[in-house]
Image (tube, grey):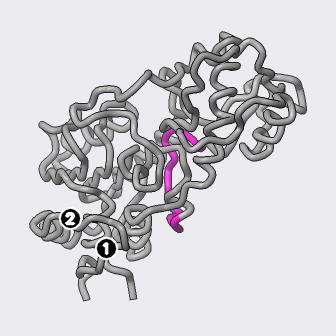
Amino acid sequence: MSLSDAVQSDAGVAAPRADHVDRLREFLDAHRQLFVLTGAGISTLSGIPDYRDRDGGWKGATPIQHQAFVSQQTKRKRYWARSMAGWPAVARARPNAAHHALHRLGKAGATSLLVTQNVDGLHQAAGSRAVVDLHGRLDRVICLDCNTRLSRHRVQEMLIAANAGWLHDSDAIRPDGDIELGDVDYAAFVVPDCPVCRGILKPDVVFFGGAVPRRTVNRAWNGLARSDAVLVVGSSLMVWSGFRFVREAARNGLPIMAINRGRTRADDLITHKLDDDCGALLDAAIAPTP
């Protein structure tokens, strides 16, 4: 049985276009070492919104910048206050049909590496193991002074204990795990220090304007070097950290398929483009392994 034999879509997932299913199956059957790159669009069915509209523009306010978080206490207070309210919804999110389908693809030995621009950990929750979290993980927190690492759940407990009366659970989240709180006095919010050295605690993620660790980038480059094609899922590729891999793949003549709603930064480089729901399409095209 072919890897891409049809399966029924999960309940509640709209059926994809039949010709798109056929084209994706053909692509998967033709290429057996895929470099898979995923973005925010793969997690929307899990309740985590994406950043951009169909034209690649911001849907709301731009996320916090790395330098602002590091250098301005007022920005850190604002971030952690909003994150305290938004984190529980992220923690409750579960993998959807797209995450499970890509796990099946990897389990069948058809991927060289799965690189995600997301920070939600949903690929691992679906069972995928060979995953590069290009922008880190929201469920981990790091001290910028002593490098101590804490779970986000522990930091949530610290935040709640230090801020009685603040909203600490909401379903209205943004892609990076915070929410809009409206007109509130962020100056009154207490941000806990590192319990080891009293340094600055920061989510273990790459904020906009920050640098992806070199070791992480090298893992991704090595995966691309082992690949015979690239599959982009749910990403507009507007951010350089992901776009560079697609650009290099195009330079090397690798076939590139993108499943994404709307345009991408690499539309002139992509050899196959499917504007469809990535969860329904992947679920229909990738069969469970025996």
Type of the residue with mark 2: Pro
Q: Is 10 drawn above or below residue 228 in the view shown?
A: below
What residue does disc 2 label? 16
Disc with the residue nearer the chain's start (1 vs 2): 1
Q: Is 2 drawn above or below residue 137 in the view shown?
A: below
Q: State the residue lying farthest toward the left.
A: 19
Q: Residues within 10 Å of mark 2 (few under 14, many from 20)?
A: many
What residue does disc 1 label? 9
Q: Is 252 drawn above or below residue 129 in the view shown?
A: above
What span is colored magenta in the figure?
Answer: 126-137
- Picture quadrant where residue 231 is located: bottom left
Q: Are marks 1 and 2 in contact (CB under 8 Å)?
A: yes
Type of the residue with mark 1: Ser
- Picture quadrant where residue 221 is located: top left
Query: Residue at position x 47%, y 39% from top?
Result: 217
Left or right of 169: which side holds 16? Answer: left
